[in-house]
Image: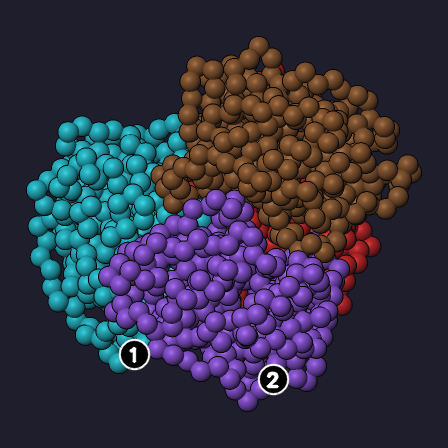
Chain colours: A purple, B brown, C cyan, D red
Amino acid sequence: MSLEPFNLYPDFNIVRLSHVNFSVTDLARSRAFYSDTLGLQITDEDSEHIYFRAMEERGHHCMVLTKSDVAEVRSLSFKVFSEVDLDKAAEYFRALEHSVEWVDRPYQGRTFRTHDNAGIPLEFYFKMDRLASIHQKYALYHGVKPLRIDHFNCFSSDVDKSVSFYNKMGFRTTEYTEDEESGRLWAAWMHRKGGVHDMAFTCGRGPRLHHTAFWVPTPLNIIDLLDLMATTGYVANIERGPGRHGISNAFFLYVLDPDGHRIEIYCSDYQTVDPDNEPIRWNLKDPQRQTLWGAPAPRSWFEHGSLFSGVSVEEPVVTASPIIAP
Amino acid sequence: MSLEPFNLYPDFNIVRLSHVNFSVTDLARSRAFYSDTLGLQITDEDSEHIYFRAMEERGHHCMVLTKSDVAEVRSLSFKVFSEVDLDKAAEYFRALEHSVEWVDRPYQGRTFRTHDNAGIPLEFYFKMDRLASIHQKYALYHGVKPLRIDHFNCFSSDVDKSVSFYNKMGFRTTEYTEDEESGRLWAAWMHRKGGVHDMAFTCGRGPRLHHTAFWVPTPLNIIDLLDLMATTGYVANIERGPGRHGISNAFFLYVLDPDGHRIEIYCSDYQTVDPDNEPIRWNLKDPQRQTLWGAPAPRSWFEHGSLFSGVSVEEPVVTASPIIAP
Amino acid sequence: MSLEPFNLYPDFNIVRLSHVNFSVTDLARSRAFYSDTLGLQITDEDSEHIYFRAMEERGHHCMVLTKSDVAEVRSLSFKVFSEVDLDKAAEYFRALEHSVEWVDRPYQGRTFRTHDNAGIPLEFYFKMDRLASIHQKYALYHGVKPLRIDHFNCFSSDVDKSVSFYNKMGFRTTEYTEDEESGRLWAAWMHRKGGVHDMAFTCGRGPRLHHTAFWVPTPLNIIDLLDLMATTGYVANIERGPGRHGISNAFFLYVLDPDGHRIEIYCSDYQTVDPDNEPIRWNLKDPQRQTLWGAPAPRSWFEHGSLFSGVSVEEPVVTASPIIAP
Amino acid sequence: MSLEPFNLYPDFNIVRLSHVNFSVTDLARSRAFYSDTLGLQITDEDSEHIYFRAMEERGHHCMVLTKSDVAEVRSLSFKVFSEVDLDKAAEYFRALEHSVEWVDRPYQGRTFRTHDNAGIPLEFYFKMDRLASIHQKYALYHGVKPLRIDHFNCFSSDVDKSVSFYNKMGFRTTEYTEDEESGRLWAAWMHRKGGVHDMAFTCGRGPRLHHTAFWVPTPLNIIDLLDLMATTGYVANIERGPGRHGISNAFFLYVLDPDGHRIEIYCSDYQTVDPDNEPIRWNLKDPQRQTLWGAPAPRSWFEHGSLFSGVSVEEPVVTASPIIAP
């Protein structure tokens, strides 16, 4: 099977992924993790919520934590180019007969909530409060010095279908893994903002959120975070890495927040703004696909993910297995 | 004077800056500089030309050297999104009564040559030969390990006019310097591809090319280049840096090629894909504007530039002076 | 059991570890590994031998490869302070009734060969040809940019005995691992030159050489080597890392040469010149001892080592097991 | 003139430079600089003093600040190997008819105060309170993450005489600058602990302290400090750098504390434990001596220094001038 072509002229213009909303069970514990350890900046908080931004972001938030009894993902949010795009997007989802609900979201302009083909709750907006820049307030930098939210990665029970759905919205595939036996997609990386991805899908029980990634300047920031977590009680929260992915060429680290939400810290992928950028194909049997340096990922990395609130999960259609650390 | 708003819906879609064509007086000497020292990859060469690409680029060239009796700049090239955009761009320039000449350029599809408001020779194309990726062929990396061409910076005798011209083509200003006394722009940084700039203008005798920049992953690559140049006969070609610009927040180094064409090596600017990204204003009197750490630039940096072939130069309309090293 | 005190005033002054002599089965293949990939500089070679030095060394060699039918370690060499120290050292070993043989070693002054308590073949010299410095010849740097040989690590069947033997020669223990159940040493790190170690011992079938380490400036050099090895046919030679040891605090990578001799690339340990520097004690059950970030080492790392020519191996006296990756 | 040989077998064993005692005029202001900005750790403080150590040091202090009306240097301190060495050292200075005064210094064992040939106040001790290690308490690291005190550099009015005096105490010269016209030394770098220097001398009005240096792991730590100082009110305290010295090969930054005491942040020099390490000779006329990359130092760097309490200053005997930035 060849990769389906993506839509160069989608009905509406998604600029980039914007923010994630996590349910967390202990707000203070999560605050310590995201603010004190990772180094995200708090832009607002009350007894039920915390809003964060990363160091070079001027939008009000890239992450919202909401206190809850269960740890879940409430929504993945995307920013569209203009109010016209927002209305076209709402129309687009309505035409697909996906529910479209206009919701109030603090610090954001008009926002609607819908879901993708698999049920992942998505929210779209075009305007968010813009804050004064802090990227040159170097006294604020600490932890891993996160610069910006980079991408989401989701488990999908049918990656072909997920890719097809996002293709139509103008997401462009940059790299993908094929299961040669079934001829089906096993994973795919798709972008809007000119990096390797805003959204990726990996074969597995889905839909679930595999991870949310933040971009940092150099591998040394990641090493600093490892040293800090290892000596402040978070050693068990280090799941995988550091390493370099074959796919995306990124230097990575995966850590788990206190509720088990997986965060990737990530640097050194590449620019993909050319519309004729050729997707790179990987074979599921190639171990360097997952780690260029050869080390396989732990089993948990292929199995654990966060549930989306109220969304049921299905078994994957592809039954091939990745290479897992013994 | 307030900054004129840029055009969010230009007539045609410029994806990014693409390549520069330099006339050089000694091809072997320039080859040694760009290939052996900087680390650009040669994609073709004959007795009159050398074509280069950087490590993560898949287009055939980001720089073309042409043997000549005089060192000049033949053109600055930009990639547009599609053939439709290319024809609309040609029509746009014709409507402005700028000459539009369709030219043959090896390894490129249909290409036309025109000029901007100040006479800078511009070329536009939509298609270039795509080469196999080399960003994971680590044995090829050397020199400063350049990943991609990043931007052009030009002297303009009237920055307000230059900015207005590029505004209309959809370039968005990210940062700018104002001369408070005259109320005029002294410099501006404008992007298409989602970084701080594809094109910048600085007040001076113009039009001339101030520099062409390449993006590298970390400041340590720049330190490696300094060590290499300093011990292989190029110490006099190091003009300014290393340092961090206040504007753009980038870590920089400026070096001169054997003909005096200025090259910037650059990392760590920030993402600007949001259409409502607010331009950052700087005062011409603020020394941290040019170097965050306080050191002023040498006089040569404000005065020396490369001529565009056949284009005459005018004195600047703003007469204020930047802060220059004593 | 408490750690036996080391001898602050040994009979002779060992300056530092100096070089290793490996038997290798394919000289060309080993040359490609050590010269082209790791980046050691060849200082002499013929059809039977290759001599290498690292970038900041001025002595003629830190590694000698000798062509052979079997891959073994011929000797570990140490530099003493003066000719007086050399003769005192020879006298010291004779008094212990260890064989002392004066040998001819190219590029070295007077040199004798003996062995330690466990049979490890040791050579001592005070004078080696000094070469012109190359640490500022930056065009020569490549591979991992190794700056100097740093230490040896050996399997010992009785670490208490090994430590006692080297204690008497003035090696000072900086860190050690104790098996709490038996009260015996499981591992120890001992220095002469003011870093964490010139010589270390780990419990196992011994004596065998566990690894030889080279010092590099930053973790990014190690990441560069990983990228290079992973994409030039050496991915299977990457054994463990990158990571940070709890012990020594060093950032590490372990790779295997084409014959299976293990090489560590190493940076960021600490200075230990104070004679009252307190040894740091670690518990064998503490997983952060081996990797601060928590990941256990692979089984091969605890089991595989290089034999010393003509030296028989014994089972370890301590039977406790370290934590091994599942 | 050739460099006078150093004494391989001095009467007493100096292990390393140990600490500096500065008089400062505003303790709170200095505390903010050294603790909050540079990142030294406070080990004790009262209304008159602050004691600091760096991250990998286990001795109680590497810097003592004493409140005073004038900003001066009270003493440079050195650690000797043992109490026997301490008494031999006292005897040595008495034999030279230098005053030897036994003084009480908190957290130190027996300590005496004397002076060198030029009058620089020196203190020697063998024992200091040892503190628990903090080099793996990564939550404490901030600022430039200083690991250890590295060296002193002093203006000397007669560098030949200063070198001769320290030669006799076993300091070994690693690099030196000669004024070819007069045949005299213009500068020299001398070590005890196995790096490029514990003590250096530069020609100038002396004796005065030119700077005290701290060692950090990588150039990126220095860039972090520049960013921090530039955006927290210390931009005027940045005097020179970042750059690489030809001499010592070190990557450097010079900053001034609130009283004008100069601090160097320094990394990547080389190991010098071999007693037959050849000193490297530099010509005063070689600009790469001061900065490998060619940029000359500012005039202040050659002229400004800290006075030693109660010590009068003389004009230099060599009248040649270094290369100074215009």
Q: Residue at x 46, y 77 (%)?
A: A306
Q: Amino acid at mark 2?
A: Lys
Task: Give the farthest residue toward the bottom.
Answer: A69
Q: Chain of mark 2?
A: A
Q: Is residue A40 visible?
A: no
Asked if labels 1 and 2 share a chain, the reply is: no
What residue does disc 2 label? A67
Packing grade of label 1 (10 A; few <14, some 14-19, many >=20) is: some
Q: Position of residue D310 (x, y in %)?
A: 75, 46
Location of residue C61 (image quadrant): top left
Q: Residue at x 73, y 34 (%)?
A: B201
Front residue of C260/C232: it is: C232
Tell me whether the residue at label 1 lies in contact with that at label 2, contact meaning CB atoms closer than 8 angstroms.
Answer: no
Q: Is residue C304 visible?
A: yes
Q: Amino acid at mark 1?
A: Glu
Q: Left of B19 or right of it: where is C171?
A: left
Q: Left of B166 or right of it: where is A323?
A: left
Q: Left of C104 or right of it: where is A165?
A: right
What is the spatial separation of the Cα atoms under label 1 and label 2, in whole angstroms?
A: 45 Å
Packing grade of label 2 (10 A; few <14, some 14-19, many >=20) is: some
What residue does disc 1 label? C180
Q: Residue at x 66, y 21 (%)?
A: B308
Q: Position of residue A271 (x, y in %)?
A: 52, 47
Q: Chain of mark 1?
A: C
Q: Secondary structure at mark 1?
A: loop
Front residue of C93/B197: it is: B197
